[in-house]
Amino acid sequence: MKQRLLYPMLTVAAAAALAADPYAALRERMVRDHIEERGIRNPALLAAMRSVPRHLFVPEDVREAAYNDHPLPIGRGQTISQPYIVAYMTELLDPKPTHKALEIGTGSGYQAAVLSPLVKDVYTVEIVPELARRSAALLKQLGYHNVHVREADGYKGWPEEAPFDRILVTAAPPSVPQALIEQLKPGGRLVAPVGATPFTQELVVIDKGADGKIKRRRDLPVRFVPMVPK
Ligand code: SAH
């Protein structure tokens, strides 16, 4: 009897889902308090943030903190970004269902999973072999079949699959790599944290016009791990 009183407003189906995923309530609170509250509005993005099981993308020893308002270590000196930053950058990217997207810095695979339902295909490149292998396996296991992971140097992009409608860089290069600008479709957009040191990074948004002309603007200051050359 007591058990039922815990969630008096939920339907039977919702209560069952909550019981099946003990992190569902934490995830809902993360989206409400840290993402919607700060002004993220894209409905498809909010739905994606509500559905991706972030706790499965972090190491077991930090799982309890998966839905907290900060980045977390994922091994090999790398981090999974703060949930709000993932949401913010994804909204800035403005993904559409017909898009072919490229991500640089697969890391845990979480950002790629969030992009998965928002675009047609996600191509994601990771330089650390162990992270590339682990994330590819997890994304496959969780059914994110339109995400393609490659172990390679992101400075080169993914030339065989270019051009891309959208490019999202999630490690910070000192300047936007020329290969990535070249692999952007006319009409496409690239979002990247750019800066020579962790203390001077800011998000840069590059729009390539239909005529191929580049427009560049600066957005929020951020702090990402540096993008390393191979
Ligand atoms: N998007 C990730 C977080 C990125 S952390 C997530 O959702 O979890 C930055 C990642 O970029 C790290 O995994 C790091 O190994 C990777 N990285 C750094 N330099 C790189 C490069 N030159 N090419 C590809 N990946 C790189």
Image: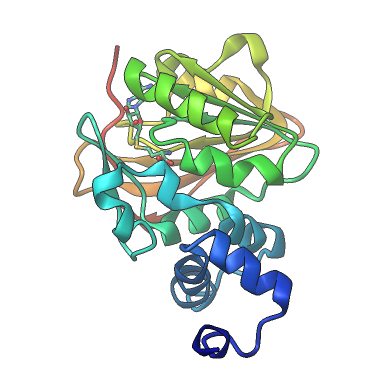
- Residue 33, image x, y percentages: 46, 77
Q: Nearer the viewer, residue 54 or 167?
A: 54
Residue name at image x 24 percent, y 34 percent: 75
- Residue 109, image x, y percentages: 47, 36
In this picture, residue 111 sits left or right of residue 102: left
| 57 relative to 158, above or below | below
- Residue 99, image x, y percentages: 74, 36
Does any portion of residue 47 appear in the rendered image?
yes
- Residue 202, image x, y percentages: 35, 50
The N terminus sits in image quarter:
bottom right
| 152 relative to 27, above or below | above
Does any portion of residue 128 appear in the rendered image?
no
Q: How many marks?
A: 0
State which image quarter holds ligand 1.
top left
| 193 relative to 153, above or below | below
Q: Nearer the viewer, residue 105 or 167?
A: 105
